[in-house]
Amino acid sequence: MASDLTGKVALVTGGSRGIGRAIALALAENGVRVAVNFRTQQAEAEEVQSEIEALGQRSVVVRADVSAAHEVSRMVETVQKELGTIGILVNNAGIARPEPVEEITEQSWDEVLDVNLKSQFLLIQAVLPAMRTQRWGRIINLSSTAAQVGGIVGPHYAASKAGIIGLTHY
């Protein structure tokens, strides 16, 4: 990594597997204390925590539904209490439901947009004040090429990922 991140605190949403897991481990390898967020994959999140601790870094596992403001607030408070002020936010949590447009229910549409887009907004709001106070912070919002090209994952997924690009440009 380009700069020294030793001693920084990161929160990685959806950090129990896939890209989130890889990011959490890469951050730990670079001296970062890492909070691993999960919603349903507790065993996998605890594995990531063990790997982070084996790298010599502190870690905490926090279950939270990132689409719910009260759970985001609780998670951020827990991370700050256990690891310190969050300086790096990796908005990685997301869901995909391959569905043709005519079969998408309003509930499915809302759930995909809530987890993929609304969660990023809620997390930014939750961590930004402390980042501004400490005059340092990094927010990394993960999107997808589906934002520009669509694809088989569905229009709700593509719309949520396009929204992330708009949010990030703010």
Image (spheres, rainbow, N blue to C red):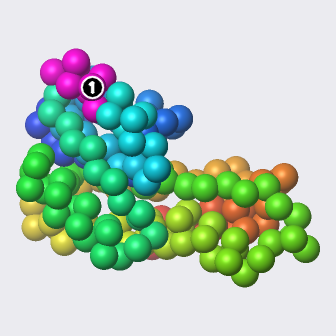
Residue identifier under label 1: 50
> Where is residue 161 shown, x and y percent of the image?
63, 62
Q: Is residue 88 above or below residue 129?
A: above
Question: Between residues 98 and 43, which one lies in front from this camera angle?
Answer: 43
Q: Dominant secondary structure of the magenta stretch?
A: helix
SS label for mark 1: helix
Report the magenta residues as a range: 49-56
- Between 118 and 145, the one nearer to me in the picture: 118
Q: Is residue 164 left or right of residue 122?
A: right
| Residue 137 image-quadrant placement | bottom left
User: Is residue 122 left or right of 80 when viewed as pictured?
Assistant: right
Question: Label 1 is placed on what type of residue?
Answer: Ser
Name the spot of residue 27 as percent of width and height, x first. Answer: 30, 33
Residue at left offset 32%, top offset 67% = 72
Q: Position of residue 95 (x, y in %)?
A: 61, 55
Front-lying residue, 80 or 146 = 80
The quadrant of the picture occupied by the C terminus is bottom left
